[in-house]
Amino acid sequence: MKIKDAMTEDVTLLAPDSTLQDAALRMGELDCGFLPVHDGEANRLIGVITDRDVVIRAVAQGCDPKATKIDSLITDKVLYCYAEDSLEEASASMRDQGVYRLIVLDNSENKQLCGIISLGDVLRHGETGLAASAAEAITSKAA
């Protein structure tokens, strides 16, 4: 199965001047823990913010969620795959990089954001073995 057949296509983007509270509220509304951050002026993806960034980095540092802009906390190393890649390739990439989600780009030429793939998406599409082995490897790296 291709990533494009399993990914979440309706991606909500945040602006870098969004606050931590904005990010947390959007994650709550969307029931997700990962949002891409997009620089509208340059029309490019500049990073991602995760629920872990909000809690572990911001709250632990005592950041004011209403005043702190996410641009100071985003992860600017964007990990990605392509829509035509297989679920096996995506799962292996997540496993190797120790992450549960990847940005999906349309192709290597355009490199336009077209979705997000998570281990949950892999699991929902019947690839239990792929999702389990990747999750197990990620979890053991974190321990």
Image (cartoon, grey):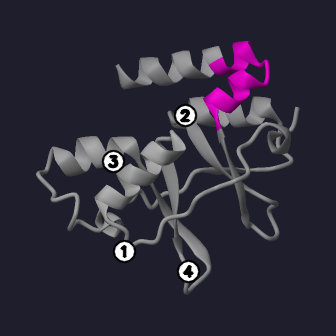
Tell me the CA gap for discs 1 and 3.
15 Å
Query: Above or below — where is 132 with respect to 81?
Result: above
Q: Give the range drawn in magenta.
A: 118-131
Residue 88 position within the rendered picture, expressed as x and y whole percent measured from the top left: 77, 29
Label placed on residue 53: 3
Is 62 on the left-hand or right-hand side of 117? left
Contact between marks 2 and 3 (CB within 8 A): the answer is no
Instruction: State which tag comes first along the sequence, 4 or 3.
Output: 4
C-alpha span from label 4 to label 2: 26 Å
Disc 4 and disc 3 in contact, CB within 8 angstroms: no
> Is tag 2's residue or tag 1's residue first in the polypeptide sequence?
1
- The residue sitting at the left extreme is 62
Q: Circle 4 is placed at which residue position? A: 40
The residue identified by callout 1 is 17
Query: Pointers 4 and 1 in contact (CB under 8 A)?
Result: no
| Whether residue 18 is situated above or below residue 135 in the rendered picture | below
Residue 56 falls inside the magenta stretch? no
Element marked by disc 2: loop
Q: Tag 4: residue type?
A: Gly
Residue name at image x 24 percent, y 48 percent: 57
Against 21, residue 84 (above or below) is above
At mark 4, the secondary structure is loop
Disc 2: which residue: 100
Q: 1 or 27: nearer the eye?
A: 27
Of the residues shown, which amino acid type is indicated by label 2?
Tyr
- Which amino acid does the dot numbered 3 rest on? Asp
Instruction: Decide which of 2, 64 is in the foreground and name it.
Output: 64
Identify the residue at image location x=41%, y=71%: 16
Tell me the quadrant of the picture where the C terminus can be found. top left
